[in-house]
Every structure is written in structure tokens, then in C-alpha cells.
Amino acid sequence: MPTPPAVPPHARSLAVVNEEIRALLEAGGLVSPEGRRRYEELLVEWAAVVRGDAAEAA
């Protein structure tokens, strides 16, 4: 059975990524194209961290 890709050791914690997402949303950062792009990047990072956490728990 293939194993899921591991989160790189330099990956930020889920709490840190969540905080950055919250700050972006609270500041209305999704209005600009750059803000939307950053939000999408953060969601990808968040998902990778969650997958890494799940893999470690298994």
C-alpha cells in the first residue's frame, strides 16, 4: 500500500497556517487578486499539514 507524501520537516504548524488564514480573512485580504492567490496557497499548505498529521497518527 503506498504511503501518503510526508510533510517536509520545515513545514509550519497547523496553528500558524490557521492564524495566517484568519488574519487574511479578517483584513479583507480576499479582495485583491494577490490576496486570493495567497489564500489559495495557504489552503494548499493547510491541507498538506493536515495530511501529514493524519499520516503520523496512523
Image (tube, helix red, strand yellow):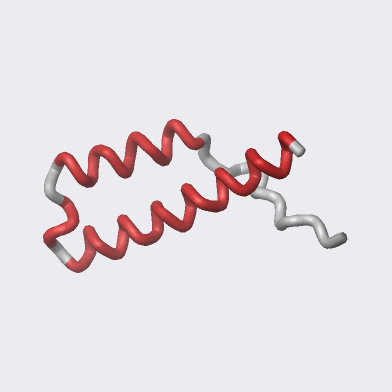
Across and down, in percent, residue 37 comes to: 30, 64
Q: Name the quadrant of the C terminus.
A: top right
Between 4 and 32, the one nearer to me in the picture: 4
Measured as percent of width and height from the top left, residue 46 is found at 47, 48
Q: Residue furthest right?
A: 1
Q: Position of residue 32 (x, y in %)?
A: 14, 63
Who is closer to the viewer here, 1 or 36?
Answer: 1
Q: Is residue 33 above or below residue 22?
A: below
Q: Is residue 1 left or right of residue 46?
A: right
Q: Is 15 placed above or below 27 here?
A: above
Picture residue at 51% right of the left edge, 51% below the top: 47
Residue at horizontal 42%, vertical 34%?
Answer: 16
So how many labels did they put on this image? 0
**On the image, which quarter does residue 1 sit in?**
bottom right
Which residue is found at the position 42% from the left and 40% from the top? 17
> In the picture provided, is 1 more to the left or to the right than 13?
right
Instruction: List the single residue furthest toward the bottom.
Output: 33
| View extreme (top): residue | 15
User: Which image quadrant for residue 33?
Assistant: bottom left
Tell me if 20 is positioned left or right of 24 in this view: right
Q: Is residue 20 above or below residue 38?
A: above
